[in-house]
Image (cartoon, rainbow, N blue to C red):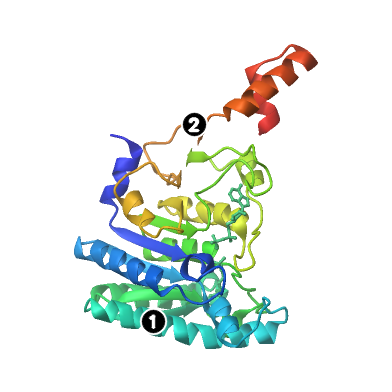
Amino acid sequence: MDVRETLKDKQKIVIKVGTSTITHEATGNIDLDKLEKFVRILTNLINKGKEVIVVSSGAIGIGRNVLGMKERPKDKATAQACAAVGQGKLIMIYEKLFAEYGYLTAQVLLTKESIANKTCAQHAKETFDQLSAMKVIPIVNENDAISVDEEKYGNFGDNDTMAAYVAALVEADLLILMSDINGLYTDDPKENPNARFVHTVSNIDSNLVKMGRGAKSSVGTGGMATKIKAAKIATKANADMVIANGKSIYTINDVMAGKKIGTLFLAANSEYKGENEVAPIKDIYKKHMDKVNKRRHGGGEDELHASNW
Ligand SMILES: Nc1ncnc2c1ncn2[C@@H]1O[C@H](COP(=O)(O)OP(=O)(O)O)[C@@H](O)[C@H]1O
Ligand SMILES: N[C@@H](CCC(=O)OP(=O)(O)O)C(=O)O
């Protein structure tokens, strides 16, 4: 069986949406149409018998937007205040949309301590388990109103790694990170036009870690660096992880249908592990590099690959 087919059978799924996925790029306002579709897609997964846990970013972005701020807040207190305003709005909308389909939601706000401190983590797990038993959908975010740069434990700062910790805590079998890009490339394609798409990752080695660079958008936090970190956490906890493009939220259905879309990181215990699968080098670039290699060393394919990695 093709490894992607196995995604159809995943039962407990953590889905993280970034600020860029749920807001309009031009205005920073909530993209209601997208959120409505997102909730319908999740409801449909639940109706199929799956369990979903939502990790939603957006508190700071939405808060800053309704407060009329043009720039990302630079100081801690303002960021925290924006989060406090935005989180309320965000949860209100999720609650309303899920209620339309007869589902209850629960707001779960975590801090780094919730995971790093064993007792707190146990309490958090009990909450998730109980919500699951009650068929209530958790909508999770970092408690940014109090945890921005929290001193003792630090803060997550990005929801990618937090979502991975949540996936590990609830023993999910799949984590999906919806991003503003198709998945992982060998380099940030916004900077390097020759970056190649990475379809499947079996081993998160040092080469792969080097590929993940920071965020370039005005709303995104973390970029691919935090997603690779998240992949390490999730796969170690035996969950597969997919990074996919949230531009069309229906991509979630494609992932769940087993289509070869996004980047799939295989769980540590996956029987499908092999070589990392990277898209072939672009034709024009390949021809150019062939010429360069030949001129320089009379070399071929091997050097071409080495130089690109
Ligand atoms: N190797 C890479 N492959 C793909 N994207 C990368 C890579 N390195 C850095 N990035 C950047 O990461 C961004 C996605 O992360 P981020 O801005 O945090 O958005 P989001 O929260 O929507 O996921 C991409 O738009 C891209 O600019
Ligand atoms: N917890 C923050 C989001 C942090 C974060 O990772 O943002 P993003 O890169 O948009 O997923 C918030 O709700 O604004």
The residue lying toward the viewer, choosing from 262 and 201, is 262
Residue 143, image x, y percentages: 53, 80
Of 245 and 226, nearer the camera is: 245
Q: Where's residue 219, x and y in %?
A: 60, 68
**Comes first in the chain, label 1 or label 2:** 1
**Secondary element at tag 2:** loop
Q: Quadrant of ligand 2?
A: bottom right
Contact (Cβ within 8 Å) of mark 1 with mark 2: no
| Cα separation between marks 1 and 2 | 42 Å
Assess disc 2: are there few (<14), some (14-19) or many (≥20) residues with their C-alpha within 10 Å of its C-alpha.
few
Q: What amino acid is at disc 1?
A: Ile
Q: Left or right: where does residue 107 sit relative to residue 213? A: left
Which of the labelled discs sits on residue 275, or is there none?
A: 2
Observer-nearest residue: 271 or 81? 81
In front of the other: 202 or 74:
74
Residue 103 shows in this picture: no
Q: Please name the residue that numbered disc 1 is placed on.
A: 93
Q: Locate residue 151: give its quadrant.
A: bottom right
> In this rendering, which labeled residue sits more in front, label 1 or label 2?
1
